[in-house]
C-alpha cells in the first residue's frame, strides 16, 4: 500500500535562519508530487523532512499517520531515497549495493538475488554483466540506474528523489524519466521529487508544488498549474519555453 | 655480539608492536568519537598535538615520576610510545572518515543503516587506506623513538646505542642504529604493500 504523507505547520531553522516557515503539505497514496522552486527556496529541505534528514523546529511530520520521532533507521528502510548523485558505495559491487536494504530487512539471499536480477534487467543493467562490477567501472547513467535499483528493490511504498537526474545527459535523463513514469503509472508507490527542471516536473509529476522563500506558493494539479496566474508560476513557465527556430 | 643484536631487535619489535597495537585499539575508537562529536574531537586532537611536540627524552622524564604508568623500565617506554602513536592514528582515522563523500554517508543513513551499521559497513572500510597510512607513520615513528626509551631502561636496540655512546664505540652504536633503521624501512615497506592491497580492494578512488 503506497504511503500517505502529512507535513503539518512545520518550521525548519538552520543556522538561525528559517528555511521553511509554517509549511503544511498533505500527500495522498499514489500521488506523484514535484517540488519545484529556485535554488535555496527550501524544496530540498521539504523533501528531507520526509526521511528525517531535516528536523522540524516546530510542527510534525507523519508518514502513514505515524509521526516521525526517535530513531528513524528502521522506518527509513521502507522509504526509498535517491540523493542528488547515485552515491553508490564505492567499495561494494553493484549487487551488494542493490542488496543493501533487503539485507537490512533480513531477506534471504535467494530472494534478494531474484529481486535484484529482475530489477536490474528492467533497468537495462543485465545482471550477469553488471552484478559483480564495482561502481567506478560504470558510466554515469549506469550508476544512476543502479542507484534507482538500490532505492527500489524492497518496493518501498514511498519514493523520495532529490534532483535524481541532475548529472546525466538529456537523453539518459529522458529514459530515466520514462522509467519513473512507468513506475508512477503502476500505482504502487507515492513519489515525491525535487527538480528545478519544469519540464521534468510536468512530465513526471501529477501535482506541482512551487516552493519559494520557505513557503508553498502554489500547489496544483499539473493542468491547473499550467493555467495558474501566479506571477512566479508564469515566470517559471516563461523561462521553460523553448524559443522557436527563426 | 650477534646474539645480543638479535635479542635487542626482537625486544625492539615487541615494544613497538605492543605500543602501536594499544595506540590503535584506543586511537581508532577515539577518532570515531571525535568524528561524532566534532567539538570535543578538535579539543582532543589539540591535546595529542601538544604531546607530539614534547621531545621524547623529556616525555620519558615526565613519565618516570608518575605512579602506575611511570618508573624505570619497559612499561614507561611503552606508555610514551603509545602517546606518540596516537596522533597519526587518530588524525588519519578522522581524515579517512570525514573524507568520505558526504552523499555516500548520507546514502547509508537514508537506506536505514543504524549508526553502528554505517560505521562498520561503510565508514571504516572506506577509511581503511587512510587508517593504514596512520598506522604506518605511527610504527615508523615508534621504531625511532623506542631507541631513546633505552635511556630509561626501556630495552631494545637503544641499549646498544647508549652503551656505544658511553664507551665511545662506533661499532656498538651502529649495531643498534643500523637494525633500527632497517626495521623502520621494513615496516614502511610492509605497510605500503598492505595499503596498496587495501586500495585495490576498497577502491579509494
Image (cartoon, coloured by chain):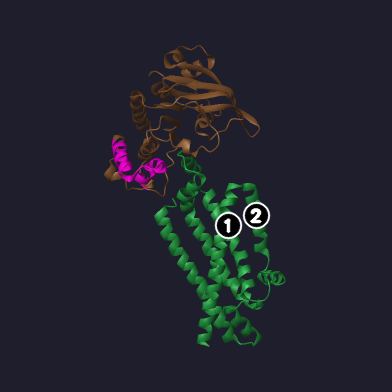
Check the rendered structure and report the hue given to chain B.
green
Chain of residue at mark 2: B
Total numbered labels: 2
A174 magenta-colored? no
What label sits on residue B90 in the rendered view? Answer: 1
Q: Against B145, is B116 above or below?
A: above
Image point (62%, 72%), residue name? B75
- Quarter of the image with the N terminus of chain A is top left
Left/right placement of residue B105 relative to residue A135 reads right
Indicate whether residue A101 is drawn in magenta.
yes
Q: Of helix, strand and loop, which one carries label 2?
A: helix
Tell me whether marks 2 and 1 sit on the same chain: yes
Q: Residue at x 52, y 64 (%)?
A: B136
| Label 2–label 1 contact, CB within 8 A | yes
Q: Colour of chain A?
A: brown
Magenta segment, prevailing SS (helix, strand or loop): helix
Amino acid at each position: 500500500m503506497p504511503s500517505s504523507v502529512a507535513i503539518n505547520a512545520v518550521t525548519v531553522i538552520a543556522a538561525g535562519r528559517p528555511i521553511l516557515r509554517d509549511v503544511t503539505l498533505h500527500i495522498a497514496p499514489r500521488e506523484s508530487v514535484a517540488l519545484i522552486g529556485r535554488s535555496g527556496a527550501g524544496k530540498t529541505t521539504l523533501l528531507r523532512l520526509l526521511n528525517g534528514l531535516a528536523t522540524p523546529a516546530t510542527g510534525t511530520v507523519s508518514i502513514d499517520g505515524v509521526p516521525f520521532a526517535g530513531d528513524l533507521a528502521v522506518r527509513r528502510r521502507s522509504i526509498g531515497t535517491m540523493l542528488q548523485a547515485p552515491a553508490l558505495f564505492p567499495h561494494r559491487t553493484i549487487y551488494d549495493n542493490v542488496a543493501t536494504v533487503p539485507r537490512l530487512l533480513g531477506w534471504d539471499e535467494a530472494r534478494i538475488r531474484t529481486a535484484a536480477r529482475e530489477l536490474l534487467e528492467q533497468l537495462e543493467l543485465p545482471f550477469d554483466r553488471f552484478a559483480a562490477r564495482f561502481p567506478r567501472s560504470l558510466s554515469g547513467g549506469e550508476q544512476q540506474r543502479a542507484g534507482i535499483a538500490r532505492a527500489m528493490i524492497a518496493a518501498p511504498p514511498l519514493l523520495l528523489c532529490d534532483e535524481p537526474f541532475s548529472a546525466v545527459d538529456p537523453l539518459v535523463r529522458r529514459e530515466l524519466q520514462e522509467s519513473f513514469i512507468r513506475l508512477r503509472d503502476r500505482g504502487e508507490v507515492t513519489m515525491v521529487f525535487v527538480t528545478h527542471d519544469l519540464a521534468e516536473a510536468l512530465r513526471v509529476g501529477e501535482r506541482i508544488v512551487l516552493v519559494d522563500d520557505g513557503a508553498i506558493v502554489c500547489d496544483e494539479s499539473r493542468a491547473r498549474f499550467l493555467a495558474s496566474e501566479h506571477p512566479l508560476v508564469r515566470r517559471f513557465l516563461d523561462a521553460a519555453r523553448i524559443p522557436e527556430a527563426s | 655480539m650477534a646474539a645480543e643484536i638479535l635479542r635487542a631487535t626482537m625486544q625492539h619489535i615487541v615494544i613497538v608492536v605492543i605500543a602501536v597495537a594499544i595506540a590503535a585499539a584506543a586511537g581508532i575508537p577515539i577518532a570515531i568519537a571525535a568524528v561524532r562529536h566534532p567539538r570535543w574531537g578538535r579539543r582532543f586532537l589539540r591535546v595529542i598535538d601538544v604531546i607530539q611536540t614534547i621531545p621524547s627524552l623529556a616525555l620519558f622524564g615526565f613519565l618516570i615520576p608518575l605512579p602506575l604508568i611511570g618508573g624505570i623500565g619497559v612499561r614507561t617506554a611503552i606508555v610514551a610510545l603509545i602517546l606518540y602513536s596516537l596522533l597519526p592514528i587518530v588524525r588519519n582515522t578522522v581524515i579517512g572518515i570525514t573524507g568520505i563523500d558526504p552523499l555516500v554517508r548520507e546514502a547509508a543513513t537514508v537506506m536505514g543503516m543504524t549508526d553502528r551499521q554505517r560505521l562498520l559497513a561503510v565508514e571504516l572500510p572506506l577509511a581503511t587506506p587512510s587508517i593504514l597510512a596512520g598506522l604506518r607513520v605511527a610504527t615508523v615513528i615508534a621504531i625511532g623513538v623506542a631507541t631513546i626509551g633505552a635511556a630509561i631502561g626501556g630495552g631494545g636496540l637503544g641499549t646498544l646505542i647508549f652503551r656505544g655512546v658511553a664507551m665511545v664505540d662506533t661499532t656498538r652504536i651502529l649495531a643498534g642504529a643500523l637494525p633500527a633503521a632497517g626495521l623502520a624501512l621494513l615496516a614502511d615497506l610492509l605497510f605500503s604493500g598492505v595499503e596498496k592491497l587495501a586500495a585495490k580492494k576498497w577502491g579509494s578512488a
